[in-house]
Amino acid sequence: MQNREKYIMIDIHDINNLHQIVVKNSKRAKVETSGTSKNNKQKHGYGTAIIDEIVKKYNGSINREICDENYQISILLGK
């Protein structure tokens, strides 16, 4: 990233009978949707698949957004 601070923000709270987890992560100018933007793809990109498995296991829902300055993932899980 050029002249930008790297950051990860995590917000976890309950809404009615659901747990909501929102993670915002700073990003580079270009984001790969195939797992990772890092050069060594053998050692990176597993987190997305693991998160998908957990959300499926607990019958949750997941939403991913790529914004101008960050990558955001929102997860809803039943209690």
Image: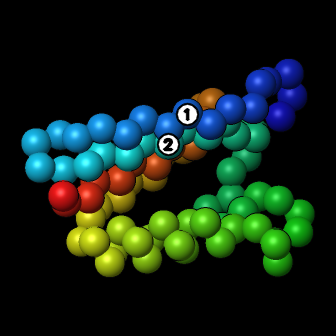
- Asked if residue 11 is positioned above or below residue 56 in the image, the reply reads above
The three-letter code of the residue at mark 1 reads Met
**Position of residue 53 measured from the top left corner of the image (x, y, whole percent):** 43, 76
**Residue 18 placement, left or right of 42:** left
The three-letter code of the residue at mark 2 reads Val
**Position of residue 70 measured from the top left corner of the image (x, y, whole percent):** 60, 36
Q: Which residue is mark 1?
A: 9
In the rendered view, how is the structure colored? rainbow
**Position of residue 24 measured from the top left corner of the image (x, y, whole percent):** 54, 38
Q: Quadrant of the N terminus?
A: top right
Residue in the picture at 11% in, 49% down: 17
Residue 12 can be seen, yes or no: yes
Residue in the picture at 68% in, 58% down: 32
Instruction: Report the number of numbered marks.
Output: 2
Sequence-wise, the earlier of marks 1 and 2 is: 1
Q: Quadrant of the C terminus?
A: bottom left
Q: Which residue is mark 2?
A: 23
Residue in the picture at 75% in, 32% down: 6
Tell me the SS state at disc 2: strand
The quadrant holding residue 62 is: bottom left
Residue in the picture at 61% in, 66% down: 47
Residue 67 can be seen, yes or no: no
Tell me the SS state at disc 1: strand
- Asked if residue 51 is positioned above or below residue 5 in the image, the reply reads below
